[in-house]
């Protein structure tokens, strides 16, 4: 095992002090707790029921369902489906007074796809082992799932049938980290680094769509209290969904110091933060596996 003197541990052969700049690229894995924002459930701001309750949207959907109605609770539920109806009502907490709910099975446990993150890094080293830094990363996330609609019988004697629909959501996040960095020499050109600090994020939902048959619809209500009617001058609003979240982070990896001016740092970053998407704002874990290239233009400052 190689041993270093105190002087060697501090990379005495290099001068690493001063300003450092870097670029990041990685794979971001988001916690699933906020993916439910895109599930289309009745209590969500973006919900499938809003679309079905519009006469004109519903006519388009009926056409894709071969003129088969989507059943509602409770009057359209056939007696032979009472057991399934009670199960559905318990799952979604549908009360006896809720007489306008559509019978839909919503996707459970939506997850985000792993996505690429890119960003930059600015750091000031007080000495060869310790510094403070500011980092920002951008990531675009997607989620998708399947929901099922209960439609009426093909004949008067058959049971209702299930028809699948697809939904998806897309959002963007900007992560900003402010923290302190420390690294410890482990080899001739390598060291282990640890970073920690405070985290802010800005999240915006970009889209929330469903597809039934061959037709795609947005379930974001851009008409507010207006009832959408085709070929009319109804005002369509730009709807901002998202907000500012915060948390903490821990970051660790291996620094390969090629010379005084360039290093390559592969690592993993753990976020414990909340993502502000309306009612979906619980703290959760998010991960970012990345590689960072650091360089210095002002090594002597």
Image (cartoon, rainbow, N blue to C red):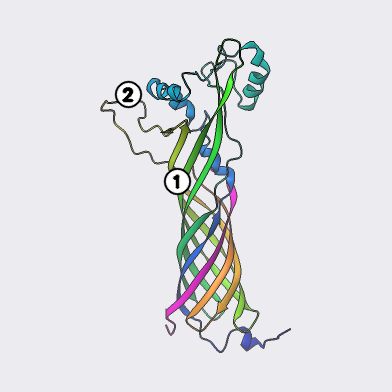
Position of 4 compared to 54: left or right? right
The residue shown at (58%, 43%) is: 33
Which tag, 2 or 1, sits closer to the chain's start?
2
Quadrant for the C terminus, please: bottom left
Secondary structure of residue under mark 2: loop
* In the image, residue 39 above or below residue 129: above
Percent x, y for residue 169? 48, 41
Would you name the residue on which mark 2 appears?
Answer: 229
**In this view of the protein, which residue sits in the foreground, 192 or 150?**
150
Percent x, y for residue 271? 57, 56
User: On the image, which quarter does residue 94 sit in?
Assistant: top right
Position of 87 compared to 117: left or right? right
Q: Do the residues labelled 2 and 1 touch (CB within 8 Å)?
A: no
Would you name the residue on which mark 1 appears?
Answer: 243
* In the image, residue 189 above or below residue 237: below
Quadrant for the N terminus, please: bottom right
Between the C-alphas of marks 2 and 1, the distance is: 31 Å
């Amino acid at each position: 095992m190689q041993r270093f003197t105190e002087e060697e541990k501090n990379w005495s052969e290099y001068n690493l002090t001063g300003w450092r700049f870097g670029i990041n690229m990685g794979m971001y894995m988001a916690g699933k707790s906020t993916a439910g924002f895109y599930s289309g459930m009745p209590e969500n701001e973006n919900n499938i029921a809003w679309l079905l309750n519009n006469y004109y949207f519903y006519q388009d959907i009926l056409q894709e369902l071969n003129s088969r109605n989507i059943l509602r609770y409770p009057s359209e539920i056939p007696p032979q489906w009472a057991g399934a109806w009670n199960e559905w009502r318990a799952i979604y907490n549908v009360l006896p007074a809720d007489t306008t709910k559509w019978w839909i099975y919503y996707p459970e446990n939506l997850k985000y796809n792993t996505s690429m993150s890119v960003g930059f890094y600015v750091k000031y080293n007080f000495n060869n082992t310790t510094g403070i830094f500011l980092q920002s990363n951008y990531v675009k996330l997607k989620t998708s799932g399947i929901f099922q609609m209960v439609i009426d019988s093909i004949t008067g004697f058959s049971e209702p049938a299930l028809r699948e629909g697809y939904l998806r959501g897309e959002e963007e996040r900007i992560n900003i980290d402010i923290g302190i960095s420390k690294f410890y020499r482990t080899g001739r050109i390598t060291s282990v680094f640890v970073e920690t600090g405070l985290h802010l994020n800005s999240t915006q939902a970009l889209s929330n769509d469903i597809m039934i048959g061959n037709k795609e619809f947005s379930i974001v209500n851009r008409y507010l209290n207006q009832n959408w009617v085709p070929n009319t001058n109804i005002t369509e609003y730009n709807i901002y969904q998202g907000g500012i979240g915060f948390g903490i982070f821990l970051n660790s990896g291996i620094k390969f110091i090629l010379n005084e001016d360039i290093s390559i740092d592969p690592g993993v970053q753990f976020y414990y933060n909340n993502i502000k998407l309306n009612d979906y704002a619980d703290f959760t874990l998010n991960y970012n596996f990345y590689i960072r290239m650091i360089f210095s233009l002002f090594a002597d400052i």
